[in-house]
Amino acid sequence: MSKPPAIAVIGTFDSKAEEHQFIKAGIESRGQSALTINVGTKGPSPVPVSLDLYPQVIEKKPAASSGRDTAIEAMIKAASEQVTRLYNSGQLVGIISAGGGTGTHLCSAIMRKLPLGVAKVMVSTVASRDMSQIVATKDIVMFHSVADILGVNSILGAILDKAAAAICAMVLSRWQPIDAKKRIALPFFGFITESAEHTRAALEKLGYEVVAFHANGTGGMAMVELAAEGYFDGILDLATHELADDLKDGYCGGIGPERFAPITGRSIPRLVVPGGLDCAVLEFTRDTVPAIYQDRKIFYYDFRSAIRLDKQETLLLADQLAEKLNLAPAGVKVLIPSRGWSEADREGGPLYDPEISKLFVDRLGKALDDSIAVRQVDQHINDAAFADIAAAMMHDMVMAHEDV
């Protein structure tokens, strides 16, 4: 009789065996199976574990132990491969760990190799810090340990047991959508929320499931990863704003080179809109405007403000976008709302500058491959009529792609 799939309790058992054994006991007390994996780089596990990677990764490969950093990278690679094999063979249903800075870096990197939907819990001493690189684009649940991880005590024990209870509940999740529909990815951000709401409604009337992504850097990259995994039948890039913030080191930057480039291994219809390309969102208020931006048009929002991009920046973005789209022009179209690209970029708005917008449109049209159609409509991006046009175009592109 085959064993039921287990929750992997993975960690640096060489220094934190007691804590990981406690998590294992908490999982098993709730009726779930657990398997333990030592990924410590200082020595073998001092207690019995299901799998100890130290001997095969560090002891047998001297090059891996030439420095702590190389040892950790070698362990991440080996453990990621092992965990992936366990998942693909149906032996693993979730993964949990506890650690400090190094343990968090090591074990979260391993978790990130598992696909969306696999339960992932990381109990960390540094969970209250910036976790953008640790969580990245994955569905990792971070638990702040509050106390340091040095033996199980009344405070840490309560945290670890709740984490064990959480992952047990997570692996019991059985929700599935009622109807299987074609999916459209819809990146957007706050300045075009009305457009996203209208577009979603229009696409749903056409029978699609719409999956929205916050175009904040991480959101756009998460969409790219899921698209490469085959989740989407079309991409309606309503917000290309991440390009602007990446250029100006803004709030929604931090995208990788994959963003707006062809989806690896996939042919997916893509409709591109310059949503938010009028501005960059930076972290300053009306009382703290940097001197270099005091002559710009500014939209004061909250703790962030948006600056209107100048001519040079606008032309550079047109070139960057065209360069990405030209890599695979088949199945790509561009839709431009001529009355403005964000809530602040409309007649009477603080960022309205049709002259600069026209520079972008003209430059983009010249730089794009001749096979990429560019359509302009006399609408603002947040108008319901614009959403109807975008949804209809996306639908036509998906249908045409099916016929190829």
Image (cartoon, rainbow, N blue to C red):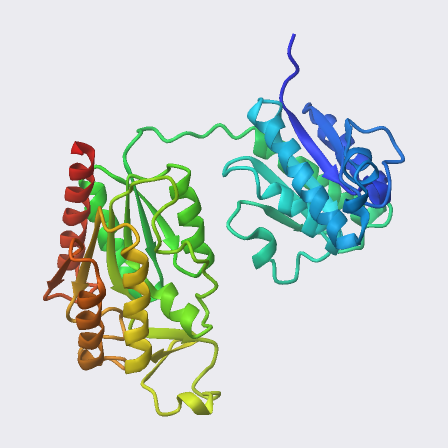
Q: Residue furthest left?
A: 378
- Residue under the image location 21 percent in, 71 percent down: 363
Frontmost residue, 204 versus 221:
221
Q: Residue furthest right?
A: 46
Q: Residue furthest top?
A: 1
Frontmost residue, 217 versus 144:
217
Residue 6 spot, x, y in % from top left: 66, 25
Residue 323 spot, x, y in % from top left: 31, 61
Residue 24 spot, x, y in % from top left: 76, 32
- Residue under the image location 68 percent in, 32 percent down: 8
- Name the quadrant of the C terminus: top left
Residue 305 spot, x, y in % from top left: 40, 78
Give the total number of marks visible in the rendering: 0
Frontmost residue, 302 versus 275:
275
The relative height of residue 58 versus residue 36 in the rendered view (above or below) is below
Q: Quadrant of residue 238?
A: bottom left
Is 51 left, or right, of 109 in this rendering?
right
Can see residue 322? Answer: yes
- Name the quadrant of the N terminus: top right
- Residue under the image location 60 percent in, 46 percent down: 141
Can see residue 276? Answer: no
Is 73 left, or right, of 195 in this rendering?
right
Is 284 left, or right, of 401 in this rendering?
right
- Residue under the image location 39 percent in, 59 percent down: 215
Q: Quadrant of residue 293?
A: bottom left
Frontmost residue, 52 versus 117:
52
The relative height of residue 178 versus residue 280 in the rendered view (above or below) is above
Q: Quadrant of residue 165?
A: top right
